[in-house]
Image (cartoon, grey):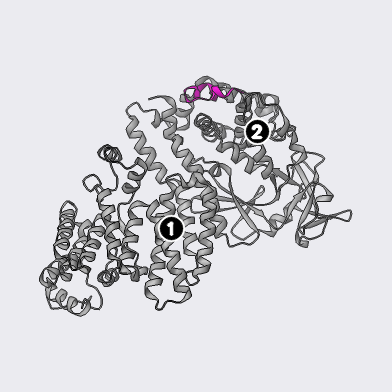
Amino acid sequence: MDLSTRLSFLFGTEEYVELRRQLILLREILMNFTCPEQNIHIICSGSLGEGVAYPGSDDDVMFSLTNCRVVMTYREVTQTGDVLLVPSELSPGYCRLLDFRRSHPGDVIHMIQGMPFVSSSLFKQHFATERRYIHGPCQSETIGYHEYDYAYCIPCYAWPDIANGWVNRERSNGWPSCEMIHNIVGNGCHVVPVGYPDSPYADLEWRISFSVAERTLMHSFNHAQFLVYNLLRLTLKRVIAKAFPGVLCSYFMKTTLFFTVENTPRQLWQVQNIETCFKLCLSVLYDYVDRIFCPNYFIPQYNMIKRKINHTNRLQILEMLRTHHLIGVVGIIRLSGESYCLDVSLSATTMEYIVDAKFMLSIHLKKVEEQIDIFFNILPHESTACSMLQLCKFWSLLKCNSTILESDLKYYIWNKGINSYCLKLMNQLLSSSGLNKQYYRLYKTLEILLIQGNRVDVTTGKLIMATYMYMVGKTESALYVLRRLLSEYPPYVIDVSKDMLDLEAYKDVMCGREFTISYKMRHAHTKHYDLIDYSLNAYPSPLKMWMTTMIEFLLDPLAYAYFLECLCHAQHQNPMRLMKSLRCLINHMDGHADEKDNVCTRMCVGIIKYVLGDSQSACRWLGLVYAMKDILPPPYNEKLSRSSLTYIACLLNKKLK
């Protein structure tokens, strides 16, 4: 196994890095939808925003104010909230903001010779809270074991004159491309509230920030460049920072990589050249420390390490960098304590599954799922028109990010969000009466979402659509959807009782069929069909009572599909087909070794037996359910003298008539 494969185990495979970048864009979209603050646009920045899933990384979020902007000349001061950029005399990377129109609140203004300037220190205090503390330009807080940095900043939609050299300088190696430069310049920059430390006006000054541009550049990196960046961060965090805490930072490593990539041929950056590329970056960093001059990538005349490196620590850091250059990548990995990825016993297949598990639990995915839940929870269920407007905005933004819709993220978007929202709309639709205007809008909204959910999320989408068709009396349509699902679903390959799926075996068995791999994999994702108890009206009536009594109600998708098929055949009064579907349901249940996974399936069999008029069998099956769960549903949950079978018979006679 080559070095790049082992490094991918540490930092992520090429596919997962691309998926992380898409997760970042999706999370940003959702955060802006769910942001409770007005006049704020949220930007995910820092290492997490760049797609780095490294333990201990801060979650950096920029809150860009939309009710004010930074302009370059007096002529551009046309709107309320405009402030004029005045370059700093001491440092080219800093500026002051003149409130020419006097439109900002007085608690952020500092007067100098009768001129109102927006103070960076007062600006931070204006947005301060009790839970947060000031950390550079950010307000930081710790939640659990994770640290969050929030930076309130002001956008500058025009490219600053001081950075024009970056736009116009000659690039013989074609990176960044002309199109990328054009996009970066069009997006402008931001100013963040922190002053130059040696300036007498430090409390007034602001730093020009190119965080959005840096994220764009990072997202353009190929896998070799991404791995080298992570190696530089690993060297800093686990090795250099232990000997010299606070001297070098990740931003210096990023700047080193930017300059190195720009000044070297594109052909050099291949995964087989990881060692060479990494040592080349260390040589560039060595030169910066030796000269005590690390130029800012966008403003090269700004020396970022002027106050960090002195004649005392310079020689020691140089010696450490020289040593790291000699020992190379493998030596640094061993020093960092991550040497388990170098274990010769690890096979490529084992590492692939471990990388998959690590990604599925990664902080990126968790944060996106949290935002999806927040978004759909705040949608107003009472106002269908308002809900539809929000959903249309959400979907139009997703369409603008075609890479998101073409990836596996569709599963998370629909299964975690829109499918649950469909059930809520079904609950509202089926519990309402009449054909008023709101009912009609609700009906049309639900139809659109069900069709989209059916296309994107194969299993859950089809089950929800089939349930809806059955509930509104379109049993032929429900049976058509169920037949499609059952013909595509391979029960002999997917074992829903296990947490892990043998995906390789799944692909091998299914390769002879006409479905694409992406389509097949969306089947394999759904291990359970989760019935939500707060949407009782969205389910067939025989299930409603039992759902209120069960502690958890998880059916595997095939069991629910067979159960729903039985109900449709019962509606059509077709006993032969009903018995065939029932046999499929019982055979499917018998294929599971673990009885715990059969609790809800046994209950479904009991319900179908009752529908067939076989009360004795129904009592036996339902009695087994409650014996296995060791519970009794209210109002019979107190200790009773009657036997379980007598109790179930009474329950059936009273509740299922």
The residue located at (41%, 46%) in the rendering is 361
The residue located at (39%, 28%) in the rendering is 342
Residue 598, numbered circle: none
The residue mark sitting in front, 2 or 1, is 2
Q: State the quadrant of the N terminus.
A: top left
Q: Earlier in the sequence, mark 2 or mark 1?
A: 2
Residue found at the very far bottom of the displayed protein: 654
Image spot of residue 285 (x, y percent): 62, 27
Which residue in the structure is indicated by mark 2?
178
Magenta-drawn segment: 264-278
Q: State the quadrant of the C terminus.
A: bottom left
Q: Is 375 or 565 nearer to us in this picture?
A: 565
Image spot of residue 138 (x, y percent): 64, 50
Label 2 crowd (10 A; few <14 / some 14-19 / many >=20): few
119 drawn magenta: no
Image spot of residue 278 (x, y percent): 54, 25
Q: Is residue 283 above or below residue 604?
A: above
Q: Is 188 or 61 nearer to us in this picture?
A: 188
Image spot of residue 414 (x, y percent): 42, 55
Which residue in the structure is indicated by mark 1?
417
Label 1 crowd (10 A; few <14 / some 14-19 / many >=20): some
Instruction: Tell me the element at label 1.
Output: helix
Q: Is 643 or 125 nearer to us in this picture?
A: 643
Kind of residue sitting beneath label 1: Gly
